[in-house]
């Protein structure tokens, strides 16, 4: 009987170098990805469908062999020491693959058996996890009767049976309603803060990336095109946009004159004057004073940070959520520009 | 080793649970061997008047074939379940867990063994209703054993196909090969009574020897060694070859 | 439902479509050819010693002569199930609604499907008899007997096709139609399709006596092996005709019911 792996303390939970996955026909789904995720971090992969997110995750979970480059998870090489990697990771893949004919409790116990827990261990762990993800009442119902959100929570619980050091979540909230999405985010955050579990997730939702991750890699066409904390990334793209709406329409010319001293003008919504604030958000106070000095009565001032979509646009020349219709209602990036 | 066993049992248990809970799987697995027994023994019973049968009851003659076919269905079903798991992603969950690779195949094979024991029991009960009793302790054990061996063989075949095709679309390939392997052996009459192409094909078909051994046990009620050893050899060879066929792709799945 | 010249043309067009979609989809016709032929080959090789050696076995030249009619009936059963499932797929997929919403004659939707079943059934019979002839079988009844064989095949194809259409209209799912297949198969095995009734005993014999498929197959078989008695042939044709009329009637009623729900 193999015990639950003790929490291996390594500086890096996930590390890859020039990782490549080539499919038959020479298509490179992943084309030279190098990244490092520190222990205890929540790292996110943001990108459109087919960008190489899932392929990367499948390599990190030992489901696919890298064509070139290497990857280490919890300090173990995914190709050479797959068994050790498997002991360290929890996996919830995109297609929440759950038997509809089994109950949540049965699936959790089976997962415990797969990880070599004792009979009693399986039982206890199932109880703890059902409670943790709020499925106690539904534990003995067949999974076929679960809602989408319940399935994802069960999927998450299944990935946690052996207290993994690194948790992989491939598009954990795709297809979920906003409420279920938030519930799942809370759970992931709680895992990260309470247990220190490293989380590696992929998403195509801007809001999810914004709200949930510590650090973000933007992936497109098999390559990481930008990386950093959401805040850093947005800062890199440029300055926040400041939109001023004067009370009197005839003051717009004056407002424009005043604002021109703070940055280049950009196209704003109807009735307002907008500039890119060169001094950053800290420049707001000066703008307000200048308006006051010029005698422009202001009805509304709107300061908008660049969105992650702007980051994506800057890095790839395309919008992320253009053709992805079922995007959640996040901070609408275009509203104040 | 013990871990492989534990995980295999866990996976076999899950397979059997699915069989019990899904009526569209459970009912055919119960009905098909019964149907084969009754339809064959009912429709063709007249053939037992041929001298090659030496006066045996055709129902008793058919029991080993029905048990073998039931075992074949059990094996096919293990492959189908695996194919569905591969298609649906459940197998990815198994694959990314530290479960021993061998257990991922031994589990479904174990489920097929249990199911074939069940279908063989059903066939024996039906035989009993048709007033063919159990063929003594050793005869009965031999029929059970060979049916379970055939279940292991066919599940290896079906699992090997499933692991390569990774799709339920491969189901006809799993089924047709198993059906043909039984029907091109000595399914309906003893080997001496076969004519034309089938008398030659059945000679080369290993299932012929498995059926002959099972039949000898059923009809004589003891183990006639000269009839039994070719069956054991045939089953052993098939198990080794198809076992390798099933296990090989397991270690190259990440490719 | 009305019938005029355009309905005949529409029937032809819809039958043509059904035949073409069947031919282009190997999964639709391979089983209907493969299984009957393989079983015919295996039974012929297994029971080759039966004629002349088994008490009660009718006098035949070879077991192959005996087996070919059963194979045709089996092929029509498998083909009919596939056709019924295809019709259900049309209903599921919306092609049926598109037809109903068009000015196509209501009757043609039904007769088109059944026409295709007849064409495919006859083609199957010709192929099976042709292959059996290659291996030494012979239709002893001559051209007249052969026509009787084809007539029963066609009527039975209408019966099975009509039943398939009926099930498709009632359940509207291909899976439900396919689910009936084991029942058809049981009906086939509990008959004299593969072995003579004269050698059966007990309740199995009773079941085969009452099974209409026994009488169909025996009428066809008599034309192949020779010495057909008028009574057997008339009974076979009459039963095939009755089955066809019942199935078409049932499918027409189910059709009308479905149309009433969506006028």
Image: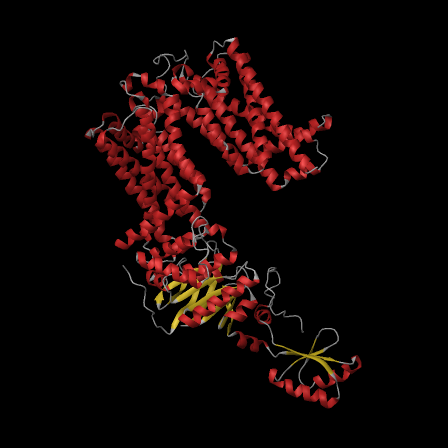
Answer left or right for A225 relative to B90: right
Residue with the most extreme right position? A250
> Does residue C245 sit above or below B228 in this rendering?
above
Please tell me which residue is depicted at 39% across the width and 43% down the height of the picture.
B79
In this view of the protein, which residue sits in the foreground, B103 or C243? C243
Q: Position of residue C155 (x, y in %)?
A: 57, 21
In this view of the protein, which residue sits in the foreground, B213 or C225? B213
> Does residue A230 sit above or below C198 in this rendering?
below
> Does residue A305 sit above or below A19 in this rendering?
below
Q: Position of residue C64 (x, y in %)?
A: 42, 19
Please tell me which residue is depicted at 36% across the width and 40% down the height of the picture.
B75
In this view of the protein, which residue sits in the foreground, B60 or B198? B60
In this view of the protein, which residue sits in the foreground, A196 or C194? A196
Can residue B114 be seen by looking at this rendering?
yes
Please tell me which residue is depicted at 56% across the width and 78% down the height of the picture.
A235
Answer left or right for B236 relative to B69: left
Q: Quadrant of the C terminus of chain B?
A: bottom left
């Amino acid at each position: 009987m193999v015990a639950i792996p003790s929490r291996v303390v390594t500086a890096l939970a996930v590390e890859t170098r020039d990782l490549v996955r080539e499919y038959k026909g020479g298509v490179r789904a992943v084309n030279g990805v190098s990244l490092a995720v520190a222990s205890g971090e929540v790292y996110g992969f943001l990108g459109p469908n087919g960008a190489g997110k899932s392929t990367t995750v499948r390599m990190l979970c030992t489901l696919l062999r890298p064509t070139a480059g290497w990857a280490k998870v919890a300090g173990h090489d995914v190709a050479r020491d797959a068994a050790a990697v498997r002991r360290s990771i929890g996996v919830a893949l995109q297609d929440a693959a759950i038997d509809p004919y089994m109950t949540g409790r049965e699936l959790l116990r089976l997962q415990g058996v797969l990880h070599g827990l004792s009979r009693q261990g399986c039982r206890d762990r199932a109880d703890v996890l059902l409670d943790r993800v709020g499925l106690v009442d539904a534990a003995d119902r067949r999974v076929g009767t679960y809602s989408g959100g319940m399935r994802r929570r069960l999927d998450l619980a299944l990935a946690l049976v052996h207290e993994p050091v690194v948790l992989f979540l491939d598009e954990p909230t795709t297809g979920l309603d906003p409420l279920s999405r938030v519930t799942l985010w809370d759970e992931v955050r709680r895992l990260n803060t309470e247990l220190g579990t490293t989380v590696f997730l992929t998403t195509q939702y801007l809001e999810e990336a914004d709200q949930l991750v510590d650090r973000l890699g933007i992936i497109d066409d098999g390559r990481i095109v930008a990386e950093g904390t959401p805040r850093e990334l947005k800062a890199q793209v440029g300055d926040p946009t400041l939109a001023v709406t004067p009370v009197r329409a005839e003051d717009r010319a004056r407002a424009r004159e005043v604002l021109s001293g703070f940055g280049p003008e950009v196209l704003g919504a109807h009735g307002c004057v907008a500039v890119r604030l060169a001094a950053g958000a800290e420049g707001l106070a000066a703008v307000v004073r200048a308006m006051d000095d010029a005698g422009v009565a202001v009805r509304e001032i709107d300061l908008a940070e660049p969105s992650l979509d702007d980051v994506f646009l800057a890095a790839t020349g395309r919008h992320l959520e253009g053709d992805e219709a079922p995007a959640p209602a996040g901070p609408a990036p275009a509203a104040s520009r | 080793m013990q871990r492989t066993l534990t995980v295999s049992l866990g996976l076999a248990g899950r397979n059997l649970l699915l069989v019990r809970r899904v009526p569209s799987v459970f009912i055919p697995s119960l009905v098909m061997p019964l149907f084969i027994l009754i339809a064959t023994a009912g429709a063709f019973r007249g053939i037992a008047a041929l001298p090659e049968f030496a006066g045996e009851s055709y129902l008793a003659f058919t029991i080993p074939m029905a048990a073998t076919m039931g075992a074949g269905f059990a094996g096919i079903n293990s492959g189908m379940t695996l194919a569905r798991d591969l298609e649906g992603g459940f197998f990815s969950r198994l694959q990314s867990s530290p479960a021993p690779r061998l257990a991922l195949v031994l589990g479904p094979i174990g489920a097929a063994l249990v199911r074939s024991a069940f279908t063989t029991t059903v066939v024996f009960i039906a035989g009993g209703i048709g007033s063919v009793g159990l063929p003594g302790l050793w005869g009965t054990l031999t029929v059970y054993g060979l049916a379970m061996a055939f279940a292991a063989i066919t599940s290896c075949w079906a699992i090997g196909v499933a692991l390569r095709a990774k799709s339920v679309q491969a189901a006809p390939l799993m089924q047709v090969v198993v059906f043909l392997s039984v029907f091109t052996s000595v399914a309906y009459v003893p080997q001496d009574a076969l004519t034309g192409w089938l008398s030659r094909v059945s000679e080369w078909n290993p299932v012929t020897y498995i059926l002959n051994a099972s039949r000898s046990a059923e009809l004589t009620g003891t183990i006639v060694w000269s009839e039994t050893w070719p069956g054991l050899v045939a089953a052993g060879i098939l198990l080794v070859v198809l076992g390798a066929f099933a296990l090989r792709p397991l270690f190259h799945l990440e490719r | 439902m009305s019938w005029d010249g355009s309905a005949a043309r529409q029937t032809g067009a819809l039958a043509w479509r059904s035949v073409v979609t069947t031919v282009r989809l190997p999964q639709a016709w391979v089983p209907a050819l493969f299984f009957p032929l393989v079983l015919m080959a295996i039974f012929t090789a297994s029971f080759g010693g039966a004629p002349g050696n088994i008490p009660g076995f009718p006098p035949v030249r070879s077991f192959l002569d005996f087996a070919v009619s059963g194979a045709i009936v089996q092929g029509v059963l498998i083909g009919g199930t596939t056709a019924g499932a295809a019709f259900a797929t049309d209903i599921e997929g919306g092609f049926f609604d598109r037809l109903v919403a068009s000015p196509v004659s209501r009757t043609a939707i039904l007769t088109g499907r059944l026409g295709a079943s007849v064409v495919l059934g006859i083609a199957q019979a010709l192929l099976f008899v042709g292959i059996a002839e290659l291996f030494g079988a012979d239709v002893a009844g001559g051209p007249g007997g052969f026509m009787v064989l084809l007539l029963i095949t066609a009527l039975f194809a209408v019966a099975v096709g009509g039943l398939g259409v009926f099930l498709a209209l009632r359940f509207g799912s291909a899976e439900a139609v396919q689910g009936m297949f084991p029942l058809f198969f049981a009906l086939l095995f509990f008959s004299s399709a593969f072995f003579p009734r004269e050698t059966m005993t007990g309740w199995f014999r009773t079941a085969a006596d009452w099974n209409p498929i026994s009488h169909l197959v025996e009428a066809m078989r008599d034309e192949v092996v020779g010495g057909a008695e008028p009574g057997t042939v008339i009974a076979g044709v009459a039963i095939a005709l009755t089955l066809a009329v019942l199935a078409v009637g049932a499918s027409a009623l189910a059709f009308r019911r479905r149309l009433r729900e969506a006028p």
